[in-house]
């Protein structure tokens, strides 16, 4: 543990050069000599990659990659917002992608034209659009026309490009554009490439059919700033407009867009090309939500109870894998309509699985695009893990139809208003679609809260709301802070406001800013007003600003001063207390927060509606129930619904461990059982709690039958495990974990039951854990299965997919040297390519040090 006596010597850098003391120089020379000697010995003694070696071949030395020092950012302060002079109202866009060899030199490019209608908010002599450098515009094809009051053509004086901001600037002759008038800008000819290796903009994707036939398709990914790769536009999220889209395409493919098809006709009399015109969007949209797909896909379809046509598209060979997405998507879309009492406004919702997609999915309004693995599920071939992932991603994307599409962030500073709300709302939709999963209780903490905690516990984190402009800064908003912390903030607000007030406030926010843009303060204002209507005097903006404007979160240290009274102190939780501070995001809040302390005790057991006391940016206190005794435990942050960790005094940790082991552990809510384990092991990792207390909590796990707390213990114990691995205490930990997992292991063994979703997750955890800690039956079964498989490695029915890595590793760890060599041969010869990752990892599982050394040379 860390004490206050630690001291650090600093070597200061003078103005020119470096000063190194003789002592430091001697240490450097000693280390260098040791490395050199070690390298010579390693080269001499490490065995060869071949099992039998008759000659040592000469080879070129392996060159290590050179890591250059990152160049200082010379872009300066971002100043790339469009001027607030013009407001688009309508786009007419035509796109013609070329995907076939018959298109000759145009293959994998596209042509297009666009007409944009806009209003002049302030008189100006320049029109600034966004255009990516890969988009080529024929300047002579541009015309500007005034369409109100005095219709006339506006002469163009010159065109400039500001590449750093991707500005396409059209300067007009004297007089320019007059405030209050409407104009059109028509660009009759532009072209671009479909070759975007980052799968952004309008891009090319491929797949193979019938073994060797390559199929080409075009798809889009416009969020955040990539519409400008496909057509010139006012490419900012608060410049919404109506869109009339037309796609010219080879008629062996289908063309999809946000709206239904209006009409299809032949292109210039050709029998091979169609013009597919789509209905004008019936709502205004930001440019980043426009989407297109041109592919030879097939679909399954149906209509929801509220009359929305839903279609799910994929490769012809994947049609059988589309039905689960259709059934689940229909149910979830209707759920959200009913839950928020706001109808889905478009006439259809397409969901499309494409082979190449940068993200898991994208919530384009009316045309959601997914990576194939995020949408396809076939119970005959895919695991429960895939099923859960598909359902969760569909729920997230459909939640965006309200959070992000109906109400859109004003700028990328506020990504959490889109992603945090979609992440939080996916859970009630999962509960409705798959009630047996108990998703809100069993998965939210693991998938969202803990992932946010782990990202936000260091100085490399950042605030949820911060000023961004450059593309890489914008993209950095789409991380665990925007998604998982954003979801956790919603859970905390719902907790201290109450579910009804929270729901009313969010509903009012959706209604007030429908088809508009919003910022964080506007959400907080609606929640404050909803609270006021219920006589709850709470200023949500004041309470929440420290949480959204500064990074990190607190650990609340509790001290029981007498039977009922408990004092509370707060400080920022850092997993590494010695990490170098980063003052980039310092605020006046000084890493203090308004903290809602929810609490109960052993005599009260209130896990549904616990009492709340606030810490007002400093210390606080709670008073336990009148029936509590000195021998009773107490809990704070009930069901871990708020964004902080809890540190109890040792006596309370002991009481909790004893109660869980000796009494009915299920009387403590499953989420609170997980919270106890999560806090204890995380605090021990951060040197804030003696490991003895966290390890004691493991004693009750042999009784635990629910997924969440068991998974929390298994995943959080890694640091304790690694710290003890080379000590005599590791044997005790190993026995504890085998005892903890034993009942669940023998309850299910290796017969996987896909009808029991939570049981399946527990089963995979049990097998992985039992084998890792040396459970004899697990080792035997894993070794037997691997022996069967290695003699027939193309048979994918011998080892279950979700424990394959464990089976391989266990067999290698406890197997012979010959088994290692056989595995190495399968890996090196690429006999089962899809298993190469697992095989490579398994080769490192050998318990023979010389074999591990050999691996360093062989792989």
Image: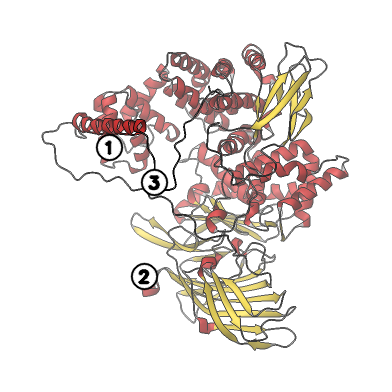
Helix, strand or loop at disc 2? helix
Mark yes or no: residue 222 visible: yes
The residue located at (19%, 34%) in the rendering is 50
Quadrant (top left, top right, bottom left, bottom right) of the C terminus: top left
Distance from disc 1 to disc 3, alpha carbons, whole Å, reads 53 Å
Instruction: List the residue tagged with mark 2.
Output: 101
Distance between mark 2 and mark 1 Cα atoms:
38 Å
Label 1: few (<14), some (14–19) or many (≥20) C-alpha neighbours in 10 Å: some
**Which residue position is annotated with label 3?**
17
The numbered mark at residue 99 is none
* Labels 1 and 3: the sequence-earlier one: 3
Residue 327 or residue 478, whichever sits in front: 478
SS at mark 1?
Answer: helix
Q: Which residue is mark 1?
A: 826
Mark 2–mark 1 contact, CB under 8 Å? no
| Residue drawn at (52%, 33%) of the image | 754
Q: Is residue 4 left or right of residue 305?
A: left
Image coordinates of residue 586 in percent, x first then y, are 63, 44
Q: From the viewer's perspective, is the residue at label 3 or at label 2 nearer?
A: 3
User: Of helix, strand and loop, which one carries label 3?
Assistant: loop
Relative to 505, is 645 on the left or the right?
Answer: left
Badge 3: residue crowd in 10 Å (few <14, some 14–19, many ≥20):
few
* In front: label 1 or label 3: 3
């Amino acid at each position: 543990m860390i004490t206050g006596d630690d001291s650090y010597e600093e070597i200061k850098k003078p103005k020119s050069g470096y000063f190194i003391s003789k002592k430091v120089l001697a240490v450097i020379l000693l280390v260098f000599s040791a490395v050199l000697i070690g390298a010579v010995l390693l080269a001499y003694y490490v065995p060869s990659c071949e099992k039998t070696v008759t000659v040592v071949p000469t080879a070129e030395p392996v060159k290590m990659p050179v890591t250059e020092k990152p160049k200082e950012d010379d872009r300066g302060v971002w100043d790339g917002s469009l001027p607030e002079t013009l407001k688009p109202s309508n786009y007419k866009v035509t796109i013609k992608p070329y995907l076939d060899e018959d298109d000759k030199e145009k293959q994998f490019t596209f042509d297009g034209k666009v007409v944009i209608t806009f209003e002049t908010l302030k008189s100006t002599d320049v029109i600034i659009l966004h255009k990516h450098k890969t988009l080529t515009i024929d300047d002579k094809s541009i015309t500007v026309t005034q369409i109100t009051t005095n219709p006339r053509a506006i002469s163009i004086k010159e065109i400039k490009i500001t590449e750093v901001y991707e500005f396409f600037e059209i300067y007009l002759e004297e007089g320019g554009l007059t405030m209050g008038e409407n104009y059109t800008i028509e660009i009759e000819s532009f072209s671009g490439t479909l070759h975007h290796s980052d799968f952004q903009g309008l891009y090319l994707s491929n797949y193979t059919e019938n073994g060797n036939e390559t199929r080409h398709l075009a798809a889009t990914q416009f969020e955040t700033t990539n519409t400008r790769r496909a057509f010139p536009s006012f490419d900012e999220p608060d410049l919404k407009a109506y869109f009339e889209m037309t796609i010219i395409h080879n008629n062996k493919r289908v063309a999809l867009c946000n709206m239904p098809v209006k009409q299809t006709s032949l292109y210039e009399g050709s029998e091979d090309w169609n013009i597919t015109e789509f209905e004008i969007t019936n709502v205004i949209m930001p440019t980043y939500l426009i989407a297109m797909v041109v592919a030879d896909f097939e679909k399954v379809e149906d209509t929801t109870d509220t009359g929305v046509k839903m279609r799910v598209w994929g490769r012809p060979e994947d049609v059988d894998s589309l039905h689960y997405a259709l059934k689940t998507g229909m149910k979830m879309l209707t759920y959200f309509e009913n839950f928020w009492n706001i109808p889905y406004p478009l006439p259809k919702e397409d969901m499309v699985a494409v082979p190449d997609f940068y993200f898991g999915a994208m919530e384009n309004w009316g045309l959601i695009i997914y990576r194939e693995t995020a949408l396809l599920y076939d119970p005959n071939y895919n695991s429960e893990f895939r099923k859960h992932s598909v359902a969760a991603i569909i729920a997230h994307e459909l939640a965006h139809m309200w959070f992000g599409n109906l109400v859109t962030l004003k700028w990328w500073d506020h990504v959490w208003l889109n992603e945090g709300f979609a992440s939080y709302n996916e859970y009630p939709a999962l509960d409705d679609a798959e009630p047996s999963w108990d998703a809100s209780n069993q998965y939210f903490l693991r998938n969202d809260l803990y992932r946010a905690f782990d990202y936000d516990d260091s100085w490399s984190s950042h605030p949820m709301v911060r000023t961004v402009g450059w593309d890489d800064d914008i993209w950095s908003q789409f991380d665990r802070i925007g998604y998982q912390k954003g979801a956790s903030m919603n859970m905390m607000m719902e907790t201290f406001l109450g579910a009804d007030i929270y729901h009313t406030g969010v509903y009012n926010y959706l209604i007030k800013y429908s088809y508009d843009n919003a910022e964080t303060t506007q959400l907080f204002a609606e929640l404050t007003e909803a609270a006021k209507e219920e006589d709850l005097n709470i200023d949500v903006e004041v309470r929440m600003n420290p949480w959204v404007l500064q990074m990190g979160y607190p650990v609340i240290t509790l001290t029981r001063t007498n039977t009922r009274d408990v004092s509370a102190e707060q400080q920022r939780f850092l997993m590494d207390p010695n990490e170098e501070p980063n003052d980039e995001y310092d605020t006046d809040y000084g890493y203090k927060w308004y903290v809602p302390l929810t609490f109960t005790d052993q005599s009260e057991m209130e896990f549904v509606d616990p009492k709340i006391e606030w810490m007002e940016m400093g210390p606080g206190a709670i008073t336990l129930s009148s029936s509590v005794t000195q021998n009773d435990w107490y809990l704070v942050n009930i069901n871990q619904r708020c964004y902080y960790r809890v540190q109890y005094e040792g006596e309370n940790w002991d009481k909790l461990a004893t109660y869980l082991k000796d009494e009915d552990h299920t009387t403590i809510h499953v989420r609170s059982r997980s919270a106890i384990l999560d806090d204890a092991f995380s605090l021990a990792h951060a040197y804030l709690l003696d490991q003895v207390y966290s390890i004691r909590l493991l004693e009750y796990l042999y009784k635990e039958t629910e997924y969440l707390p068991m998974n929390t213990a298994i995943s959080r114990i890694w640091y304790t495990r690694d710290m003890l691995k080379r000590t005599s205490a590791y044997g005790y930990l190993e026995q504890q974990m085998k005892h903890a997992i034993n009942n669940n292991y023998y309850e299910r063994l290796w017969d996987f039951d896909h009808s029991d979703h939570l049981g399946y997750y527990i089963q995979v955890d049990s097998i992985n854990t039992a084998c890792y800690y040396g459970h004899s039956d697990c080792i035997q079964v894993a070794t037997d299965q691997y022996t069967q498989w290695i003699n027939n490695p193309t048979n994918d029915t011998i080892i279950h997919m979700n424990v394959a890595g464990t089976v391989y590793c266990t067999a290698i760890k406890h197997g012979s040297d010959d088994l290692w060599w056989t595995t190495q041969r399968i890996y090196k010869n690429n006999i089962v390519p899809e298993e190469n990752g697992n095989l490579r990892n398994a080769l490192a599982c050998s318990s023979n040090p010389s074999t591990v050394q050999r691996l360093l040379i062989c792989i």
